[in-house]
Amino acid sequence: MGYEYDDQNIFARILRGEIPNDTRLETEHTLAFNDINPQAPVHVLIIPKGPYVCYDHFASLASEAEIVDFTRSVADVCRMTGVAPGSGGEGYRAIANTAVHGVQEVPHYHLHILGGRNMGPMLSRRD
Ligand code: 5GP
């Protein structure tokens, strides 16, 4: 039980500078970059720099400084990409896919911010 972090995952490699990324924002504890396979006109991934596998792992064990930094970075990304309603944007969808049932591809916690168009129904099943 518990969480095991695989430091060879692609986002760990991005954080170590081994793989390039299209950075939108970087702070002490957080990195935000464009998704390589965008599903909407705005598709930014926001990740903590710490070794957290998923949202609840981060929410359980991250320091207050990391959590505040991450959360404020979400606001900054939404503002800078023009999707934040408070800055005249039309809104966005935030997604944190987690583990098997959440169909998480990369085992480093990341929040997807998707916007720039109507995102449609919340879920579509494929079974
Ligand atoms: P997940 O299914 O884990 O929530 O989503 C992982 C996301 O990471 C996908 O949307 C995928 O396009 C993106 N991704 C995978 N590899 C890379 C990469 O090397 N660079 C960037 N920028 N995004 C990636």
Image (spheres, rainbow, N blue to C red):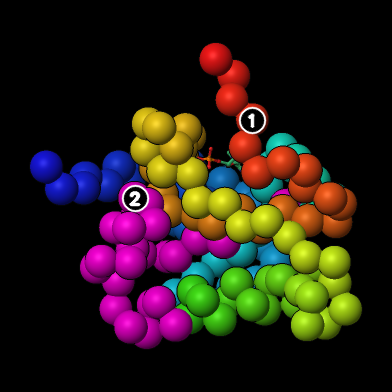
In whole angstroms, how far apart are the C-alphas of marks 2 and 1? 25 Å
Left of 18 or right of it: where is 12? left
| Nearer to the camera, 94 or 123 | 123
Residue displayed at 40% across by 77% down: 67
Q: Is 121 one of the magenta-colored residues?
A: no
* Label 2: how many Cα within 10 Å (few below 14, some 14–19, many 20+): many
Furthest-top residue in this view: 127
Tell me, yes or no, if residue 27 can be seen here: no
Q: State the SS at label 1.
A: loop
Q: Which residues are magenta?
A: 43-68
Q: Is 48 one of the magenta-colored residues?
A: yes
Residue that numbered label 1 is attached to:
124
Q: Position of residue 60 (x, y in %)?
A: 25, 66
Q: State the SS at label 2.
A: loop
Q: Position of residue 111 (x, y in %)?
A: 54, 57
Residue that numbered label 2 is attached to:
53
- Amino acid carrying mark 2 in the image: Val
Residue displayed at 39% across by 77% down: 66
Tell me, yes or no, if residue 87 can be seen here: yes
- Amino acid carrying mark 1 in the image: Ser
Furthest-front residue in this view: 121
* Label 1: how many Cα within 10 Å (few below 14, some 14–19, many 20+): few
Q: Quadrant of the C terminus?
A: top right
Decide: is 109 above or below 31: above
